[in-house]
Image: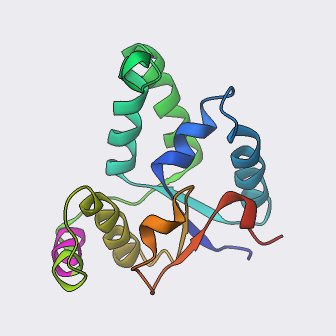
Amino acid sequence: MAGDAYLVDTNILLRLVQPDSPEHGTVRACTDLLWAQGAILFYTSQNLAEFWNVCTRPADRNGFGYSVAEADERAGLIEAKLSFAADSEATHREWRRIVVAKKVSGVQVHDARLVAAMHVHRIENLLTLNAQDFRRYEDIVVISPQNVPT
């Protein structure tokens, strides 16, 4: 697995900064293991926007209730530890191709955009807590934190 590339889904990023989450320990152990194996972990602009949304949303609306300064600090940790898979016109074109070819609609368009970024940046693996959301994409490897190969 040395040198493998993984796109890290937003749900993983959120658990990394939420120590009281039941999944925090598993997610942290998983990312530490991947880094020890030489894996490169990526995030996208979309991931960080979704991350910011949850971090700054009030707790009574299913968010973390962090201040902008607290969200900025945590986002900075992600930017420092993970590699950035930048958006581009190629990502947009690939997303358009995917949503038509796979008949993607509704909120699932966001997952299609992550898959488009993976294709453009040649990232084969997706690390997520919601593997079922990505079943339609046969050309990527979807991995849950508890299933990371050792």
- Relative vertical location of residue 60 with respect to residue 12 in this rendering, above or below: above
Residue ID at (44%, 78%): 122
Q: Quadrant of residue 104?
A: bottom left
Q: Which residue is nearer to you in this view: 80 or 47?
A: 47
Q: Is residue 57 left or right of residue 66?
A: left
Question: Which one is in front, 16 or 36?
Answer: 16
Which of the two residues, 140 or 2, is positioned nearer the viewer here? Answer: 140
Span colored in magenta:
91-97
| 85 drawn magenta | no
Q: Position of residue 126 (x, y in %)?
A: 53, 67
Q: Please indicate whether residue 148 sits to the left or right of residue 140 in the image.
A: right
* Residue in the image at 37% along x and 22% along y: 56
Main SS, magenta residues = helix
Name the residue: 20% across, 85% down.
101
Residue 73's x, y, as percent? 50, 23
| Horizontal and vertical percent position of residue 60 | 40, 16
